[in-house]
Image (cartoon, rainbow, N blue to C red):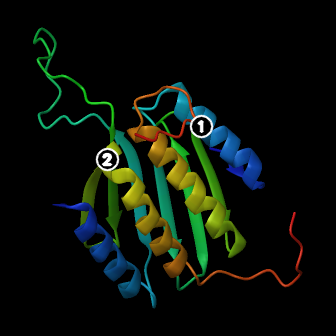
């Protein structure tokens, strides 16, 4: 259950895990305003990747990854990075 | 668990964030959804269900109240913009970096 120390490693591992089995993977985001921290977890119930932060600069990165995974989930294509415009 | 339209979900999510400012956490879950509304059939039963490939399920909770919504390809662009703005606006309690270092 690795907790990543660098965002880049976490983002790469998360996207890779999602692409191995999109139906199994879920993304969980936990925000605590009173403690001032944010935790993101990506898991397929076998592997669990986590990243925790209390830095404001990470909010944008986390929100972008969240959006990217959301778009991957609704796109019919199996390859990532495709921007559909129709 | 309340299933809402995308707009209502965003409104309720805003309320969850506002409620949890003094204590508690907001947990958001995102998962790919194939549109099934019936439980998985047992062995021997043929699946007459055609899995949809273009939807995802979003859930949010503050520990007590639970809300959810389904987003599909047609709605994702609009929803994602509003959703990103919402997250960025409300997740503002984190520490700002003192040094102005942009890596």
Nearer to us in this view, B37 or B26: B37
- The CA distance from mark 2 to mark 1 is 18 Å
Nearer to us in this view, B21 or B52: B52
Q: Mark 2 belongs to which subunit?
A: B
- Which residue matches tag 1? A81
Q: Which mark is residue B15?
A: none
Q: Residue furthest bottom?
A: B22
Image coords of residue B11 (percent x, y): 29, 76
- Which residue matches tag 2? B74
Image coords of residue B10 (percent x, y): 32, 70
Report whether B84 appears left or right of A58. Answer: left
Q: Please, is residue A79 above or below residue A2 in the view?
A: above
Q: Find numbered disc 2 in the image and state the secondary structure of the residue it sits on.
A: helix
Image coords of residue A45 (percent x, y): 46, 37
Can residue B37 be seen from the camera position used here?
Answer: yes
Image coords of residue B52 (percent x, y): 26, 30
Q: Please, is residue B101 above or below residue A6 in the view?
A: below
Q: In which quarter of the image is the N terminus of chain B?
A: bottom left
Report whether B38 appears left or right of A47. Answer: left
């Amino acid at each position: 259950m690795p907790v990543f120390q660098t965002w880049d490693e976490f983002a790469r591992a998360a996207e890779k895990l999602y692409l191995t089995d999109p139906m199994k993977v879920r993304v969980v985001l936990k925000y605590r305003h009173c403690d001032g921290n944010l935790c993101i977890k990506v898991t397929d119930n076998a592997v669990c990747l986590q990243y925790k932060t209390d830095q404001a600069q990470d909010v944008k990165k986390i929100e972008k990854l969240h959006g990217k995974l959301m778009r991957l989930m609704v796109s019919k294509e199996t390859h990532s990075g495709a921007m559909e415009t129709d | 668990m309340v299933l809402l339209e995308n707009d209502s979900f965003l409104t309720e999510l805003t309320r969850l964030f506002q409620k949890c400012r003094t204590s508690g956490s907001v947990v958001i879950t995102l998962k790919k959804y194939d549109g099934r509304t019936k439980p998985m059939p047992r062995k021997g039963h043929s699946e007459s269900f055609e899995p949809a490939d273009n939807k995802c399920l979003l859930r949010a909770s503050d520990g007590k109240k639970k809300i959810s919504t389904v987003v599909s390809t047609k709605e994702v662009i609009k929803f994602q913009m509003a959703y990103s703005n919402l997250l960025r606006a409300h997740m503002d309690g984190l520490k700002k970096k003192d040094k102005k270092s942009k890596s």
